Amino acid sequence: MKSEDILRVALEQSAIDCSCRPEDFLKEKNSVHLSRADDRARRYLTLPHICDLVSYGGNIVAACREDLLGEMETYLAGVTAVERPFETPEIYALNEIFAKADAAIAFQAAYFLPDPEALARFVPHCPYTLRLLGPADFSSLYLPAWQNALCAQRKELDRLAVGAYDGEELVGLAGASADCEGMWQIGVDILPSRRRRGVASALTNRLAREILSRGKVPFYCAAWSNLKSVKNALKSGFRPAWAEVTAKPIAFVNSLRGKGKNAEKALPGGCPCA
């Protein structure tokens, strides 16, 4: 699969997720679309969106509720630099808009796609044995240590994994979740005592190549501030592809912050996976 094929698949999926057309992400002009539910969307998304802003670098595409359409169109018409709505101080302006819908920004994430040439050039420096694992092999591994690699809430989507073993001890795990028809997301966990030894990049690269060999596009998500994860993506052969800012109900945002009666733990890595 070539880089242009990989990008095409990602654009088509983003179009499904944002209720628009793939070419909308490649235009110079920003656009706003009414968000609709779609069975083909990434499985962890809750559609329709309150508001989701996506940029592949050339413009901004927003998918939102009907009551926010006019205000988001006005807001984006005044944006002079694509990156501005994805950073402060414009984040505060967006939250003022979302507050009218009893919502706030919950996630700021960077998404990465594989560079086939970089994947092929990668030379692993991992001291451990790598093993390819299927669902039967990792059925007993839904444990806190592997919560990024595997998702206990959506076990049926976990299709493939690669484990790093020191003898018979599992010291690192990368898992692939079939989050949509054409794209599988990679998550990685390494035991704290075995980090900084090239394990994460070796696992990520191997799993990405295995996914591509099955005709699927691997993708990788990281919170912008999670520099360890971003560095792993780049080292493994992935390159930045799109950025995303997502609004969620205030109650959900407060739960991520540890507030409220039903407060939840923040999602691993700060990446939107719920």
Image (cartoon, grey):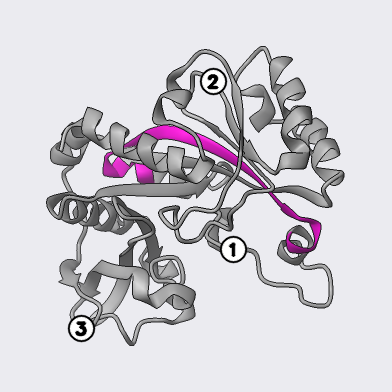
Q: Assign a secondary structure to mark 1.
A: loop
- Disc 1 marks which amino acid? Leu
Pointer 2 or 1: first along the chain: 2
Which residue was labeled with disc 3?
168
How many discs mark residues in the rendered view? 3
Q: Which mark is residue 70?
A: none
Categorize mark 2 by other alpha carbons within 10 Å: few (<14), some (14-19), many (20+). many
Q: Assign a secondary structure to mark 3.
A: loop
Categorize mark 1 by other alpha carbons within 10 Å: few (<14), some (14-19), many (20+). few
The answer to whether residue 187 shows anywhere in this view is yes
Eyeballing the image, is 257 above or below 113? below
Asked where in the image residue 263 lies, by quadrant, the reply is: bottom right
- Disc 3 marks which amino acid? Glu
Eyeballing the image, is 255 above or below 143? above
Which residue was labeled with disc 1?
267
Categorize mark 3 by other alpha carbons within 10 Å: few (<14), some (14-19), many (20+). few
Q: Assign a secondary structure to mark 2.
A: loop
Residue at 52%, 35% in the rendered image: 243
Highlighted magenta segment, given as a residue range: 233-252
Which residue was labeled with disc 2?
59
Q: Which label lies toward us, 2 or 3?
A: 2
Residue at 20%, 66% in the rendered image: 128
Eyeballing the image, is 58 above or below 207? above
Q: Which label lies toward us, 2 or 1?
A: 2
